[in-house]
């Protein structure tokens, strides 16, 4: 399978997703927008993964490449290509599907529980998952649910944490992709966001959850198996 990644900043790579791609023997290519890489041709890829980043999905005036990126995401959706968005990637998908993206009432940074909705519990994407489990968060924005999408997950601080659209487009606001070095990099680059709050953990709290990293890797791989390579 030919999988293409959209990467927005050097310190937000694929993490556990890349490990899964290599283990499965899929081909991986990438557009690194920070390095001015070209966009792919849709007929050259079977799946598109849109990663996170500190920019907002509506900041085309600051990051002009966002306009072309959203256009290609829209074309991939229409073509029926498998599309997975993580954090900013989820927000970009929501925007492409006509939903509003805006600042959430609370920033959510750290390890917090995620709750599957009724649709989430019956979705093949989360098959075998418990109703509640812990994930890693780092976001200040959220999105409305696009028309026709199924709401799959929520948290106490953010209602729209995951949705699926037409069975081939999956948006995850939270992170199961991160590895220990990723969190360390994010703490370094986003230190100004770590303000004391019920929904913002300290760097020490975030970096202390090494055992949790094993669990989220397993959950990320399970989602990829059930979304990218399985079909209804």
Image (cartoon, rainbow, N blue to C red):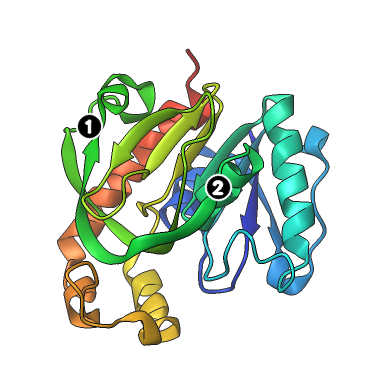
Disc number placed over residue 63 in the picture, else none: none
Question: Pointer 1: what residue?
Answer: 129
Question: Pointer 2: what residue?
Answer: 100
**Where is residue 130 drawn, in percent x and y?**
16, 33
- Which residue is rendered at x = 47% and y = 30% of the image? 164
185 w.r.t. 82: above or below:
below
62 w.r.t. 160: above or below:
below
- Which residue is rendered at x = 21% and y = 40% of the image? 115
- Which residue is rendered at x = 31% and y = 30% of the image? 126
Q: Closer to the camera, 222 or 158? A: 158
Say left or right for 202 vs 66: left
Say left or right for 198 vs 117: left
Image quadrant for the N terminus?
Answer: top right
85 w.r.t. 199: above or below:
above
**Where is residue 194 drawn, in percent x and y?**
30, 81
Circle count:
2
Discs 2/1, front: 2
Instruction: Report helix, strand or loop for mark 2.
Output: loop
* Mark closer to the chain start, 2 or 1: 2
- The reply to whether dot 2 and dot 1 touch (C-beta < 8 Å) is no
**Where is residue 36 drawn, in percent x and y?**
79, 69
Say left or right for 198 vs 30: left
The answer to which quarter of the image holds residue 125 is top left
Residue 224 visible at all = no
Residue 221 visible at all = yes
Instruction: Report helix, strand or loop for mark 1.
Output: loop
Q: Closer to the camera, 105 or 127? A: 105
Disc 2 from disc 1: Cα separation: 29 Å
């Amino acid at each position: 399978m030919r999988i293409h990644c959209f990467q927005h900043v050097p310190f937000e790579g694929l993490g556990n997703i890349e490990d899964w791609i290599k283990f499965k023997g899929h081909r991986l290519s990438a557009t690194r927008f920070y390095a001015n890489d070209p966009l792919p041709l849709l007929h050259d890829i079977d799946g598109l993964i849109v990663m996170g980043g500190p920019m907002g999905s509506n900041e085309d005036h600051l990051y002009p490449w966002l306009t072309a990126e959203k256009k290609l995401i829209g074309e991939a959706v229409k073509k029926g290509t498998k599309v997975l968005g993580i954090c900013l990637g989820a927000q970009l998908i929501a925007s492409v599907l006509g939903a509003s993206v805006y600042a959430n009432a609370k920033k959510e940074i750290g390890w917090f529980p995620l709750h599957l909705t009724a649709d989430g519990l019956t979705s093949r994407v989360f098959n075998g998952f418990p109703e509640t489990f812990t994930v890693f968060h780092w976001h200040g924005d959220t999105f409305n649910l696009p028309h026709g999408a199924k709401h799959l997950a929520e948290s106490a601080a953010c209602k729209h944490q995951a949705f699926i659209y037409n069975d081939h487009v999956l948006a995850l606001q939270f992170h199961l992709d991160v590895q220990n070095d990723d969190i360390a990099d994010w703490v370094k680059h986003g230190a100004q966001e770590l303000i004391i709050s019920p929904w913002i953990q300290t760097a020490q709290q975030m970096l202390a959850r090494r055992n949790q990293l094993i669990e989220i890797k397993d959950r990320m791989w399970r989602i990829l198996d059930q979304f990218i390579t399985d079909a209804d």
